[in-house]
């Protein structure tokens, strides 16, 4: 130091130094502030806007499913819902316990809600509400409205939920919806662009959204779903909506389209009631155009139970129920057709030329072939039978002989012409093809050659042959339509399906005429197996039909000797299935029906009355009249793709 | 600034004389109260009230357009503490420096004992033992430590400053360093890095102003710069290192992931930047009102000021602080005793350190440490400490001519 300074002066000097340092610090801070608040302000304003304006997904309303006359079969219904917001809950268990005192909240449900709350918290999505009960009863809703207002984090509100107003009636046709599973996500997101996929996943995860899991709901998923919209919402840092901004109409949600099916819901009801608790299936087809007017599989389940997730216990009950309510009998149940198959055998015989309609066979009640004996259902035999009488009396011996002469390959070929062995999906799930056996199939499946004796069984609709009630109804419709092509339809107005089968293999009108005369004989000529059921009670139109009995097991020789054939002495599960196929009116057919009454024993006794009543109801209610959707479609100017909005008829 | 021989009137003496002439004074506390620099006190209180207003904004519910019931306590607590702090500040301001000096050593020893007790029996909180629980009373000795160390150092130099206008010998500064390092080390060990840094900063300031030779200052600064990499690698804990990394990434404009450590500073920058020149208006800060900035009621309260009142508001606040510090330095310059000067410098440094470090941290220039913004951030002990420090400065102003004996201070 050049100059000695006093501490006092030095102190002042140091104060100045420090003030200089302080000034530099002040300048730095102000400089930084001007950088942030002048130079980069616009950038940060943009970031701030992005921060809190979120495009929240607005779920679309799912389209309704309506019957041919516009009656709602699946619709969106407003129902009270209670949910909790995890981030606003102090103690989720305490809150749920309090809710449990006000509403019915089973322990299993409670455990599931707690798990979901935990999941949302770990995903840092504590603001996403967790549904506690999707559908509150009116009383519960009212009670919660009064008592839950002071409960932090509990929301009680009205929400849209899928509802099946006709419950079990359409369980197997419509299927049901459920919350999207991981499987649904991959299945439905397939083939979308990555960006699209993200939105799509967000949509499917939305608590209000359900996806079709089974049946028509699944088939028409894209048609029914609609397009999600975006709402502009101001959210805080935790993602909680703070304020709704004005809605841009271009980004509003587009509701799903309504789906019309060809079924007449009232005819469906009549048919189900007529089963009166018996298990079985019935299918009604419009002969003129292949519209399926009724599709009954009973017993059924209530699809409403699936919408908000069915409990494991309830599902097990359905699954293990011996009456198999989950089993879609009408299009997925495979039965031996029994004698209802005889028209196919007869048609094959005439087509092949091996048999003429006038050729007769003598029935003594049994038929010997090789070293075995085949029995006719009528002990003692029918006497001399031509084709008309063979069908009318359902003479087994006549058909053993006819089948043997025609040969298995020809019968199988004609069976395929009638639609057997084909899968008719028609927009449903669970459809099966059944089985039309032939030597090639047997060689492949069993590694054994075809025995000619099997052809005899084939001739009376037994053996390996398996058909669905839907196939039987279509066969009957083709006969009723004099062999004209038939394209079965269940979707009236909805998505097109590519792989539907049209039954258009040529059938000779004269040959079919002989089948119709035989079926007329069954119900309307003395001695016909269904003679009592021909009159529909409508004072004019009659039905023609054919009974069938499908063996559930072989009848042993001992039983035959004891005279045990039906009913008494045999457990229900072992009793024969009763079948009946019919059409009406006889001269100008409009409707064809097939009825299967499981373990009903006698086709003419158990199934024919049902067929008669169903056909009578269809005629009386005019089920095949012009459906609502075709009127609407006609009213829509050509070129516009407008989809009519459904409304309850 | 020529103070050779203390001849002539200083401005303070002039004012005192004016007050006497106006017959305001006489002896006793009332005369003293009249002589307090009320305009300065008004500024201090105004800054405190600004804090209350900003806490009201933090607690505002923009949906309900009403104060959020959960956060209504923020501004009420703050104003209550401000009131208590005001009383303490005035009370301390009226204390003659001699009494301050007399309590310097008992206070120092007491604080060191308490810090040792914390070390032994401290209550854990937030991963650090900072509190001492005595029955229902919870003590946080690191807060009074700031004031105690300041007056202890000032008292040390008052005693050791050689007469005859010479600078003290080096060992006196060494002793001061020891006095400083004992409590600073104990606080650092808690660990409470921010308070340890504040203690070290104000202590270093006092040593600097006590006249340590410039070559030692330069040496210390040089060593400090050289030690930075070593401190980064060996002293800092991983989470502290991450904060430094975030900071450097933020200053150099490197993109961060916007999560974790960098989220807070990112959101703070967005709030400040979005404020622009004049801000979005009181209660209108979108970023702030929607709780995007964590810890906005405590360390990050400057963000809501910058968002709602913009550049004008933020620079205005910094300028008011700068004005208070310049005024405090002038108090130090005018005080006639070494105790008064150094205590003022130490107290000012403590407050200034918090103000500067807090702003620098919120603006993304300094790593994030628990540093409140003086008089504004929510937090009782810090507010009381700051008000007490101002009390000391005001006392030095009021008693600038007080002659202090070098004796009897131990």
Image (cartoon, coloured by chain):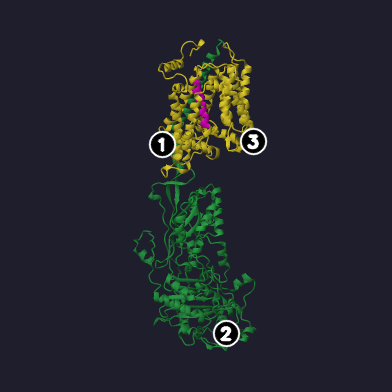
Chain colours: A green, B yellow
| Residue B261 image-quadrant placement | top right
Magenta highlight: main SS? helix
Q: Kindly report which numbered mark, 1 or 2, lies closer to the viewer in this rendering.
A: 1
In the image, residue B29 sits, relative to residue A145, either above or below, namely: above
Mark 1, secondary structure of its residue = loop
Expressed as whole percent of the image width and height from the top left, the position of residue A333 reads: 54, 71
A353 relative position to A372: left or right: left
Q: CA distance from mark 1 to mark 3?
A: 45 Å
Mark 3, secondary structure of its residue = helix
In the image, residue B2 sits, relative to residue B43, either above or below, namely: above
Label 3: few (<14), some (14–19) or many (≥20) C-alpha neighbours in 10 Å = some
Does residue A162 show up magenta in the picture? no
Q: Which residue is mark 1?
A: B282
Expressed as whole percent of the image width and height from the top left, the position of residue B210 reads: 57, 18
Residue A195 vs residue A287, the one in the foreground: A195
Q: Kindly report which numbered mark, 2 or 3, lies closer to the viewer in this rendering.
A: 3
Q: Which residue is mark 2?
A: A376
| Residue B15 image-quadrant placement | top left
Marks 2,3: beta carbons within 8 A: no
Mark 2, secondary structure of its residue = loop
Tell me which chain the residue with mark 3 is part of: B
Expressed as whole percent of the image width and height from the top left, the position of residue A641 reads: 38, 59
Expressed as whole percent of the image width and height from the top left, the position of residue B194 reads: 57, 31
Q: Kindly report which numbered mark, 1 or 3, lies closer to the viewer in this rendering.
A: 3
Label at residue B121: 3
In the image, residue B337 sits, relative to residue A323, either above or below, namely: above
Marks 1,2: beta carbons within 8 A: no
Residues drawn in magenta: B382-397
Q: CA distance from mark 2 to mark 3?
A: 103 Å
């Amino acid at each position: 130091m050049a100059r000695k300074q006093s501490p006092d002066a030095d102190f002042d000097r140091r104060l100045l130094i420090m003030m200089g340092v302080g000034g530099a610090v002040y300048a730095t801070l102000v400089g930084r502030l001007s950088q942030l608040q002048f130079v980069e302000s616009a950038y940060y304003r943009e970031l701030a806007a992005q921060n809190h304006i979120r495009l929240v997904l607005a779920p679309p309303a799912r389209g309704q499913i309506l019957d041919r006359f516009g009656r709602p079969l699946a619709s969106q219904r407003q129902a009270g819902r209670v949910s909790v917001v995890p981030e606003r809950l102090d103690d989720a268990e305490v809150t749920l316990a309090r809710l449990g005192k006000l509403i019915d909240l089973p322990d299993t449900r409670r455990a599931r809600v707690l798990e979901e709350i935990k999941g949302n918290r770990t995903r840092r999505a504590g603001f996403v509400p967790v549904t506690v009960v999707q559908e509150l009863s009116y009383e519960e809703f009212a009670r919660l409205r009064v008592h839950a207002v002071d409960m932090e984090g509990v929301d009680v509100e009205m929400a849209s939920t899928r509802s099946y107003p006709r419950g079990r009636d359409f369980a197997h046709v419509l299927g049901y919806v459920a919350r999207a599973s991981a499987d649904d996500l991959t299945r439905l997101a397939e083939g979308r662009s990555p960006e699209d996929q993200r939105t799509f996943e967000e949509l499917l995860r939305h608590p209000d959204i359900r996806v079709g899991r089974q049946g028509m709901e699944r088939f028409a998923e894209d048609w029914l779903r609609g397009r999600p919209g975006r709402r502009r919402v101001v959210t805080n840092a935790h993602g909680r909506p703070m304020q709704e901004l004005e809605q841009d109409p271009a980004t509003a949600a587009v509701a799903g389209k309504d789906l019309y099916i060809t079924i007449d819901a009232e005819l469906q009801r009549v048919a189900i009631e007529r089963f009166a608790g018996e298990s079985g299936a019935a299918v009604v087809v419009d002969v003129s155009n292949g519209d399926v007017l009724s599709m009954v599989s009973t017993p059924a389940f209530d699809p409403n139970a699936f919408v908000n997730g069915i409990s494991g216990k309830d599902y097990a009950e359905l699954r293990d129920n011996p009456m198999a309510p989950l089993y879609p009998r009408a299009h997925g149940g495979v039965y031996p057709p029994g004698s209802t198959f005889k028209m196919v055998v007869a048609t094959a015989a005439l087509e092949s030329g091996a048999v003429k309609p006038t050729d007769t066979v003598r029935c003594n009640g049994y038929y010997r072939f090789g070293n075995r004996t085949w029995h006719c259902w009528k002990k003692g035999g029918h006497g001399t039978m031509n084709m008309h009488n063979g069908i009318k009396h359902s003479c087994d011996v006549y058909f053993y002989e006819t089948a043997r002469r025609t040969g298995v390959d020809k019968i199988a070929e004609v069976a395929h012409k009638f639609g057997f062995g084909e899968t008719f999906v028609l927009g449903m799930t669970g459809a099966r093809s059944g089985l039309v056996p032939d030597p090639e199939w047997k060689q492949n499946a069993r590694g054994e050659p075809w025995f000619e004796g099997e052809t005899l069984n084939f001739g009376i609709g037994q053996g390996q042959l398996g058909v669905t009630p839907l196939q039987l109804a279509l066969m009957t419709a083709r006969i009723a339509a004099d062999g004209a092509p038939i394209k079965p339809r269940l979707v009236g107005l909805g998505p097109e399906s590519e792989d539907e089968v049209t039954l258009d293999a040529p059938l000779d009108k004269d040959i079919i005429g002989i089948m119709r005369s035989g079926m007329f004989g069954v119900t309307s000529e003395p001695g016909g197996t269904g003679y009592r059921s021909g009159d529909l009670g409508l004072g004019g139109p009659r039905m023609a039909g054919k009974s069938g009995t499908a063996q559930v097991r072989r009848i042993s020789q001992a039983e035959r000797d004891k005279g045990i054939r039906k009913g008494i002495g045999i457990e229900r599960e072992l009793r024969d299935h009763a079948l009946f196929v019919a059409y009406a009116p006889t001269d100008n057919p409009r409707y064809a029906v097939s009825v299967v009454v499981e373990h009903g024993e006698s086709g003419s006794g158990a199934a024919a009355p049902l067929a008669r009543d169903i056909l009578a109801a269809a005629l009386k209610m005019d089920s095949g009249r012009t459906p609502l959707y075709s009127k609407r479609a006609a009213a829509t100017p050509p070129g516009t793709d407008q989809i009519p909005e459904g409304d309850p008829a | 600034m020529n103070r050779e021989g203390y001849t002539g009137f200083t401005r303070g003496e002039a004012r005192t004389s004016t007050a006497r002439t106006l017959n305001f004074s006489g002896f006793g506390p009332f005369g003293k109260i009249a002589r307090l620099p009320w305009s300065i006190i008004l500024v201090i209180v105004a800054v405190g009230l600004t804090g209350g207003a900003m806490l009201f904004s933090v607690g505002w519910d923009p949906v309900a357009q009403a104060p959020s019931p959960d956060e209504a306590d923020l501004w009420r607590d703050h104003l209550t503490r401000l009131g208590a702090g005001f009383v303490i500040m005035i009370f301390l301001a009226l204390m003659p420096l001699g009494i301050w000096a007399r309590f310097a050593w008992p206070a120092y020893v007491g604080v060191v004992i308490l810090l040792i007790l914390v070390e032994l029996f401290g209550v854990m909180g937030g991963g650090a033992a900072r509190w001492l629980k005595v029955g229902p009373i919870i003590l946080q000795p690191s807060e009074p430590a700031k004031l105690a160390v300041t007056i202890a150092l000032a008292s040390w130099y008052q005693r050791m400053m050689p007469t005859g206008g010479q600078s003290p010998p080096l060992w006196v500064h060494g002793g001061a360093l020891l006095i400083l390092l004992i409590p600073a080390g104990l606080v650092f060990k808690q660990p409470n890095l921010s308070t340890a840094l504040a203690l070290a900063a104000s202590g270093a300031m006092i040593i600097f102003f006590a006249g340590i030779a410039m070559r030692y200052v330069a040496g210390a600064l040089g060593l400090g710069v050289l030690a930075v990499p070593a401190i980064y690698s060996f002293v800092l804990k991983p989470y502290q290192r991450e904060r430094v990394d975030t900071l450097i990434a933020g200053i150099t404009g490197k993109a961060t992931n916007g999560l974790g450590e960098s989220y807070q500073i990112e959101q703070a920058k967005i709030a400040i930047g979005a404020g622009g020149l004049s801000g979005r208006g009181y209660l209108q800060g979108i970023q702030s009102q929607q709780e995007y900035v964590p810890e906005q009621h405590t360390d990050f309260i400057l963000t809501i000021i910058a968002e709602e009142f913009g550049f004008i508001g933020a620079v205005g606040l910094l300028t008011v602080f700068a004005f208070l510090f310049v005024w405090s330095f002038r108090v130090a310059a005018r005080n006639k005793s070494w105790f008064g000067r150094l205590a003022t410098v130490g107290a000012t440094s403590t407050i200034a350190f918090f103000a500067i470090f807090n702003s620098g941290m919120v603006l993304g220039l300094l790593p994030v440490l628990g540093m409140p913004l003086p008089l504004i951030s929510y937090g009782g002990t810090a507010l009381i400490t700051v008000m007490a420090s101002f009390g000391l400065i005001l006392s030095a102003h009021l008693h600038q001519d007080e002659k202090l004996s070098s004796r009897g201070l131990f």
